[in-house]
Amino acid sequence: MSKRHHRCNLCGKEFETGANLREHVERRHPKSDVHWWVVAEEPEQELKFER
């Protein structure tokens, strides 16, 4: 089982795949300037994100 997860830092929604995240960003945040990066974290830890 993969420990990877994908999170939109604009709204905080999580996705199972990067493709699902990319589709979400294109549909829900089309005018946002998006930067992609990898984050190593504990899954239980809550990350702050922009609203």
Image: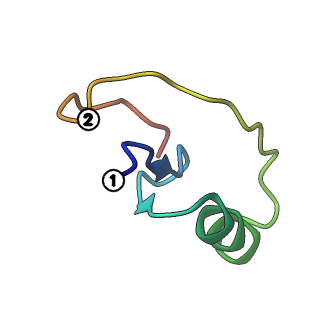
13 or 3, which is in the foreground? 3
- Colour scheme of the picture: rainbow
The amino acid sitting under disc 1 is Met
Identify the residue under disc 2.
Answer: 43
Residue farthest along the left direction in this orientation:
44
Rounded to the nearest angstrom, the CA distance separating label 1 from label 2 is 14 Å
Q: Which disc, if any, is residue 27?
A: none
Secondary structure of the residue carrying numbered label 2: loop
Tell me if mark 1 has few (under 14), some (14-19) or many (20+) residues whose alpha carbon lies within 10 angstroms of its own. few
Left or right: residue 30 compared with residue 23: right
| Image position, residue 27 (x, y; %) | 71, 78
Query: Disc 1 marks which residue?
Result: 1
Asked if the residues shown at circle 1 and circle 2 are in contact, with their CB atoms under 8 angstroms apart, the answer is no
Please name which of the two marks, 1 or 2, marks the residue nearer to the observer.
Answer: 1
Name the residue rendered at 77%, 45% in the picture.
Answer: 34
Furthest toward the front, the residue is 1
Residue 37 x/y as whole percent = 68, 31
Describe residue 2's horizontal placement relative to residue 37 as left or right: left
Counting residues from the N terminus, which is met first, the one under dot 1 or under dot 2? 1
Q: Residue at x 34, y 30 (%)?
A: 47
In front here: 42 or 13?
42
Disc 1 element: loop
Instruction: Give how far across and how far down residue 43 sits, in percent.
Output: 26, 35
Would you call the spot at circle 2 few (<14 residues within 10 Å), some (14-19), or many (20 or more)? few
Q: Residue at x 41, y 51 (%)?
A: 12
Count of marks placed on residues? 2
Residue at image coords 77%, 37%:
35
Q: Position of residue 30 (x, y in %)?
A: 79, 67
Q: Amino acid at mark 2?
A: Pro
Q: Is residue 42 left or right of residue 38?
A: left
